[in-house]
Amino acid sequence: MGPTTAGQQGTAAPQGAVAADAADDETILVTGLRSSFESIRNIRRNAPQVIDAIVAEDIGKLSDLNTAQTAARIPGVQVYRQGGEAQNVVVRGLPNFTTTYNRREIFTAETRSVALQDFPSANVAALEVFKTSSADLVEPGLAGLVNVRSRMPFDFRDGQIAGSVWGLYTRQGDRLSPNFNVLATKRWDVGDGEFGILVNASRTEMQYLDAEISNTDFLQTFRNENGQIIADGGAGTAARFPDIQRMFYRSGNRVRPSINGAIQYKPNPDVEFYLDGLWQGFRNKVDDRLLAAELFNGAQASSLTFREGTNIVNSGTVNAPPGSLFSFQGGTLNETDTFQFAGGARIKLEQLDINIDVARTRSTFRGSTESVDRRWIGAPTIRFDTATPRFDIDRIDFLDPAAQSFDGLFEENQRSTGGDWQFRGDLQYNFDSPFIKNIAVGARYTDRKADRRYSNRFGQASAPVNAAALPLEFRVFDGVNLGGTTVWAAPTYESIRENLVPLRRLVGFSDEPVNAALLYTATEKNLAGYGQITLGNEDLEAIAGVRVTRVRTRVAGPQPTGIADIDDGSSNTSVLPNASFRARLSEVVQLRGAVSKTRTLPTYADLNPALVIGAPPPGGIGTPSAPFQAFGGNPFLTPFTSWNFDAAAEIYFSPTGFVSLTGFHRRIDGFIQQDSFRVEDPTLGTVQISGPVNTGEGRIYGVELQGQAFADFETLPDWARGFGLQVNVTYLDAKTEQPDGQGGLTFQPITDQFNGVSRWNYNLVGIYERYGFSTRLTYNNRSRFRATQQFRGDDIYTETARPAGRLDLSMSYDLNERFALFGDWTNITQEAFRQDFTSARNGAPPADFIKYLRYDESTISVGLRFRFGG
């Protein structure tokens, strides 16, 4: 195997493409961890932007399950983990980045970006995170741009068949799943030129299970009447505690098939034509389940223990009335198919470089949810502990379906589609001058369409139905033993999906699925042009450019609103300048500086004028402790902008080693953030509505420190030189103007459950590679972040997330030149993700409780890596 510099891949790489290593003009042989270190070092050193990357040192050798997990190892990148994998990605405290695949914009269905977790790491040559902008890049978001780079035929010297097969065992899901990745490529001499073809296919599967024990987010007050605690939001002073405890299992089977291919043809050294394509699939069978213990409804209380000097209950026992235990069993199927096909040419005419690229993207998401609600018939005795949290339930037979009654059927049907045409052309004139290196100009046009359809319904039987009489197969589900009651009988996923017609008839529905009604359609046309000049030489380089972009967006609901500003759409023109310099003070020391302006557009869902009501809470009526959830957009949102300032000092002290210190500042105007408030509806009861708002100004300050090296010291014996180390630490202070609950705005931390910002984020990686054996031990962690803030009358309710540290191990051994054994162990320590809440109602002092503890999946995999040819 012998991949050359990634700049030789056939995509229309702009002048800012990081792969080209013009300074050293060297070949990067990606054949081991040491060579991976070299690639990371050279990308950082020679790129005109501030960029960090992870490079696969061999085909299929990125040890992570998906690219989002790989991204978590890059300085300044934070991820939210759930369902056995890394999911939402945040760059330098913000989720607002552009995703590209081989330098082309890519997205999933109606969204503006693609989920990085949908890229299997085995298919990826490199993951590149651009933290500063230049005019020739596809418009980065506020946080930057993340590019997933695939392999191309000309990355290889000759033909090769390579890949890996492995078994993945999930410790909580207790399932062994087969996985594979295979790549085949070949190059031929054709006349005076050459021709190459590559095909890469993979399939990853995981049976995952997360376990989550929780207190409800509503802090109820109670009065005492002869030993009976009665919920009383106004006058209750006898006790305060969360009035529902829940045990939730997020479980399912997730499959991601993927195929990508490419053709490259060079009739001569100065002309190259290429075609490449990608199919990315996602199949997720979600069989989540919940058990909720309701501690209200006039329960007889005893053995209450209180926090010292307060009426806040730590633990106790309640003899609850019949029907106080609720459960649902989900049967959800989500599927996504994303296709992207592209072609183009790279032409050199003496001092002029011409790049042309045309791409077509089409993505579809389909989802259907079936959920069977039940209640236990008997009157339970519930011993609860709000501090742990935990509950133990007596006087209920959890193994017998006949002890349950049917409480309703919830159905959900949704479909989203998105597609675009992309065109870009770039011209770069290279000067024979000691002062001017080149001038580049270019244009990009995209024509985007999307739509979103969604409906749900909930129904109950007209007469009581015992759960044992349902046309379903029940199975005793044995989850994760967290202490307390964690085992109960529940319908199987398969029996729910296979018996939908009789279930629908039972609640008075038609036999057909609920029709997915149109929520919105979106159209968008974006035209951009840029000009950029590069000055200097290899020791001192400066870049200045400007990008002018005009976008017209229209998001329309199923019916016109009658408001012209909504129905006609909006247009926005932005002028986005950038300037940067890179100064090599010596072969070892390098300084950087950059300033740029970026613009981030609202998502189509954020602009949607419709309101969507979610699944009903137990009982079908919203209450303060279990409200209806509603989600909507804001058609009056405007794009938000940011001025970005970066400065870096870098020391490159060996072929694999460097240390860098980067400081950055973002000055934001009109940041878009989710907000929540509650209303009382005469039909639905309590409804919590969440939607986006422009929050005003924002500011982000941060520092990144990173370093890597192998122990290349002549005084060490040969075996000891195999040790290596990577370290990165990021500090962030990210705040935006947000409502303070008193009618004003104050600077507060960016607040979001999935995209919250931790002040500290760090990665520690220990490496050893010698004599055919390599191992990598990685620890990743981040500090707490504010996940939610809501204004509930006189209660400013907040939730704070405390992410769990993660320890991963990857090992491999080369049996010979063609075969290697490998193994991976993720989330070794299985620390709990913890989220706390603070609440105060009706003038009572604030009280803190654990909202939930989540124990994420841990995986063990063993496999064989192979390579023939090359």
Image: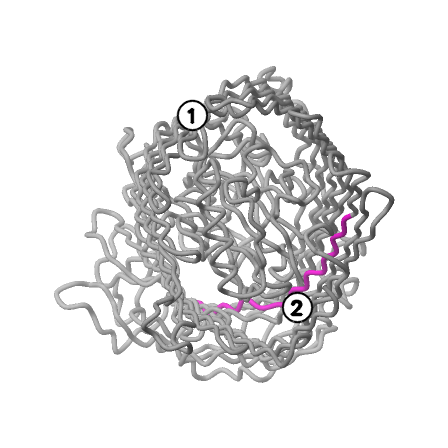
Instruction: Check disc 1 and report the residue beneath it.
Output: 579
Please identify the quadrant where the C terminus is shown: bottom right
Using residue 26 as the reference point, say whether residue 366 is left or right of it.
Answer: right
Q: Is residue 776 above or below residue 592?
A: below
Where residue 466 appears, as percent x and y from the top left, is: 65, 74
Q: Nearer the viewer, residue 231 or 109?
A: 109
Q: Nearer the viewer, mark 2 or mark 1?
A: 1
- What is the crowding at mark 2: few (fewer than 14 residues within 10 Å), some, or many (at least 20)? many
Where residue 449 appears, as percent x and y from the top left, is: 71, 32
Residue type at mark 1 is: Ala
Using residue 521 as the reference point, say whether residue 547 is left or right of it.
Answer: left
Write down the quadrant of residue 222 in the picture. Answer: bottom left
Q: Residue furthest left?
A: 309
Here the colouring is one colour
Where residue 288 appears, as percent x and y from the top left, is: 58, 66
Where residue 28 appears, as percent x and y from the top left, is: 57, 54
Q: Is residue 446 above or below residue 402?
A: above
Kindly report the secondary structure that dominates the magenta region of the rendered protein. Answer: strand
CA–CA distance between discs 2 and 1?
45 Å
